[in-house]
Image (cartoon, rainbow, N blue to C red):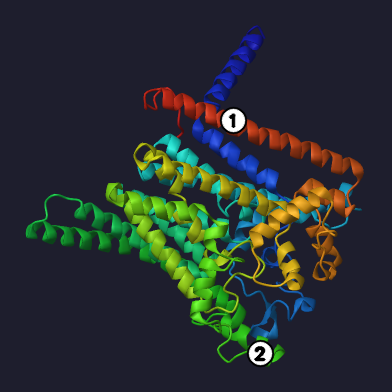
Amino acid sequence: MEGGPNSACITIAIMTSRLGRWLHDPLVLLCLTAGMLAFVVQSGELGTADTAHRLQTTHWFWTTEPQVFPNEYPEFGLHGRAGKLYSWYGIGQSLIMWPADLVGTWISHWRVFASYEDDPSIRSIVVSYGTNILISVLTALVVFRFLRQLSFDVNESVFGVLALMFCTTHLHYTQNMQENNYIMLLTLMGFSYQYEWLCSGSRRALVFGSAALGLNLLTRITTALDTAACGLFLLAVLWFEKDGSLVISRQDNVTFQRSLWRRAIAYCKIALPVYAVFALLERAYSFYRFGSWTGTYLPIFAREQRLQDSTLPANFPWSTPFYEGFLGALFKPEKSIFLFDPLLVLAIVLLALLWPRLSAEIRAYAVATGVLLVTYLSFYARYAYWAGDFAWGDRYVATAVEMLALIAVPLLLRYRGTLGKLVWRGGLALIAASLMIQVASLAFWLPLEIYQSENIGHPMFIIALRFKNIVAFTLGRMQAWGLNTEAMGQDQWDYVHITTWNFLPFLLRRVGAAPKWVVELAFAIWIAALAGLLICVWRLKYVLSSLRKNQGTEQPTVVSQVG
């Protein structure tokens, strides 16, 4: 046993060395930051009834429970095959929640939780924390990878990821678990790995990217638009590279066309079969529920809604005037994409100012995401619920907005020296405003202002009202300022939920179902995690500062390779 102490010392030295390397690796610190952020912002609730219904579908996979309980109809569910009630949502988010649902259900049956009331439930706590942290960390990895592929340096890429995480509606949907962040993760995986194929010819990368985009079809079928946008991105890269060439002879054009045709064939041979597999799975799930291989649930939804309300128009749910839905998403104070995601404004301004200087891949990405955003705006413009109902901003187009806004901060950093002080300071102001808006979105459960609007009226500047609510709640002036409206009290649980800070320790204390020691432990963990988040951000800033000082070289700092 003489070597025992020496072996232990060697092991400790190796672990210390690895820890030191990790603490100097921007990517590791970025993942830690993303994970800590997702942990800190959780409320333990799933955020909306939509996600709760999708979790019930998850439970249906492996238990004897139905997809939809009879008492939920007609508020939710549609009659499908054999007259049974089925969920109308895609199955994608239900699949990603499956592992956490298994663990959460198992933990909820532990004896220690036998007397715990389900507000919030153990199961929802485990699912929200586990799923959102996983998606947040994976998104940080994929976005960093993709920004590096677009030729941004390490500093620009890291700040681009941080801007997405902290300064766009991505932060809100990290707390309120709609499908948005999962869709964005899969879409950017598709962009990144299919672009890798374009650059390297890697068939493996093309299969992986196509599978990510195909999996999106199981989440929301309209993500076929994301798949098309990815194809447009690849095509635009080739076009802008050709357009930037100094040689534009007729022979070069012929050569380009032949090369483009060969690439298109190679792409289709791999990507289309992968897409077909996922499309078949999506259609099979639709057939299982509603007995149709070609239709969607919308005709059934429209028919059953008209049975409940005969005043609905014949073209329901495509009954909104196009201009109302399209312009509403742009300028309506309750839903404007420019108000809820100010980084979009910065991205548009920078693209307009810098377009001739941008590389082919950045211009191609801007075109693809810009077209994707306009297409989503147009598609949902006539939908009866074009704004996404109970949501922070316009959730149907939020993912496309975030994708276009993604390059705003990296571009601002790269071209700081040529943009001038006015643009630089204006950019910083928009970043600061974006951060404040997204942090404010976390303060209360999202229906608060929607309930208030039923009594206060429209039009309503939701973001300004949210800041007013924060100040009033902090000062104990909600009643005095007329912010406790009648609609807020119609449901006791909703009233409890929207009248406390929307983070798990505060919610546990407000509900009163958890023992005091559990609440105190939750607060201790939450404060420690918040401190850990601040430490990660500070350490990341220090590492990036060191990287900049090393004459623009990345050699002194380790940067992990992604994918």
Q: Mark 2 points at which residue?
A: 306
Q: Which residue is at a point 40% across and 41% down the rendered structure image? A: 148
Horizontal and vertical percent for residue 227? Answer: 42, 64
Viewed as shown, does residue 397 lie left or right of 527? Answer: left
Viewed as shown, does residue 235 lie left or right of 407? Answer: left
Q: What residue type is labelled 1?
A: Trp
Horizontal and vertical percent for residue 28? Answer: 54, 34
Mark 1 Cα-neighbour bin, 10 Å: few <14, some 14–19, many ≥20: few
Horizontal and vertical percent for residue 167? Answer: 56, 48
Position of the C terminus by quadrant: top left
- Residue at the limit of the structure toward the top, as seen here: 2
Horizontal and vertical percent for residue 94? Answer: 63, 62
Q: Residue 416 got which mark?
A: none
Viewed as shown, does residue 222 lie left or right of 54? Answer: left
Q: Mark 1 points at which residue?
A: 538
Q: Which residue is at a point 58% across and 55% down the rendered structure image? A: 169
- Is mark 2 in CB contact (under 8 Å) with mark 1? no
**Residue in the foreground of this view, choosing between 475 and 288:** 475
Q: Which residue is at a point 43% across and 49% down the rendered structure image? A: 407
Q: What element carries label 2?
A: helix
Residue 391 in view in this figure: yes
